[in-house]
Image (spheres, rainbow, N blue to C red):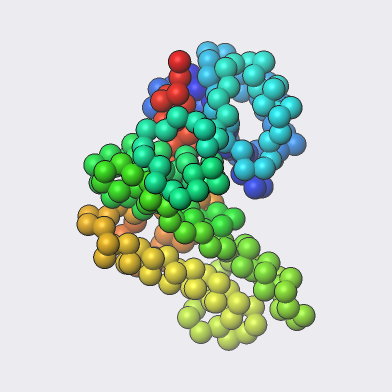
Amino acid sequence: MNLIVDAGNTSIKMAVYKGKVLVSFASILPLNFLNYLKNIFNEFPHIKNAIVSSVRTLGEEDVKQLSVYCKVYVLSAATKIPFKNKYGTPKTLGVDRIALAAAAFYHNKNGNTLVVDAGSCITYDLINSRGEYLGGAISPGISMRFHAMHNQTANLPLVEKEGDFELIGNSTKTGMQSGVVNGICFEIDGVISRYKDKFADLTVILTGGDAQFLSKRLKNTIFAHSNFLVEGLNCLLEYNKD
């Protein structure tokens, strides 16, 4: 069995796989990590290998504690990958984007795949039909845009993505909500359309914390997969096992 640890900007996703089958999943706060480790290994004592993808919430001491329980692989730019990395600066490519590219490669091996990850930032990552990772784009996510407007102006309030959003906001709050949410939807739809012009039979996968929220608001046909990054990490762990 495999343990997948995806430590993002605000939370840590913990998943247990038996082969390719997801048998357990939880999203926890970083301060609960060590206690949750004990519980998960009590429940799944047959876990032999783990992979850690950490943006910033896990430190060396946490990884050391995990290694007490099983063999640990820490995802980095030096990790062996199944696809060709054509990124211009491969050492700067985020581990989360490496995992998404791996998931896209295995999900659609002989096709063109665009992964849109709607989290703290919105990332766009393209794997082509030749198994080459070409790169993509990064833009601010929903929460980041709301916070930027609030923090960098004198009078705009901090609002959230609650309720429905009309095109024309009739108050400061709804105007900000329309600008952020509709603006992101127009952005994603526009990016997808441009990629479809360049890559035939493009498969588009939407993932990340805001994926379900955005999926029903997009015009383009997409496949929403909330655990796509975790799935990619499991694929990488299987690929790197001794």
Extreme top residue here?
46
- Residue 21 lies, in percent from the top left, at 40, 27
**Rendered image quadrant of residue 202:** bottom left
Q: Is residue 32 above or below residue 214?
A: above
Could you tell me which residue is drawn at 50 percent across and 48 percent down? 89
> In screen coordinates, is 164 left or right of 159?
left
Q: Give the residue displayed 55% in from the left and 72% down from the top.
A: 180
66 displayed left or right of 98: right
Query: Which percent across, then down, holds residue 194?
Result: 33, 67
Query: Viewer-proximal residue, 197 or 86?
Result: 86
Q: Position of residue 66 (x, y in %)?
A: 65, 22
Q: Is residue 155 visible?
A: yes
Q: Position of residue 36 (x, y in %)?
A: 67, 28
Q: Does residue 223 appear to the left or right of 129 in the view shown?
A: right
Quadrant in which the C terminus is drawn: top left
Task: List the single residue furthest toward the right.
Answer: 154
Image vertical order of residue 61 relative to residue 109, above or below: above
Q: Residue at x 61, y 68 (%)?
A: 145
- Given the current orientation, which residue lies at the most extreme front position? 88
Q: Is residue 125 above or below residue 34?
A: below
- Asked which quadrant contains residue 73, the reply is top right
Q: Nearer the viewer, residue 133 or 65?
A: 133
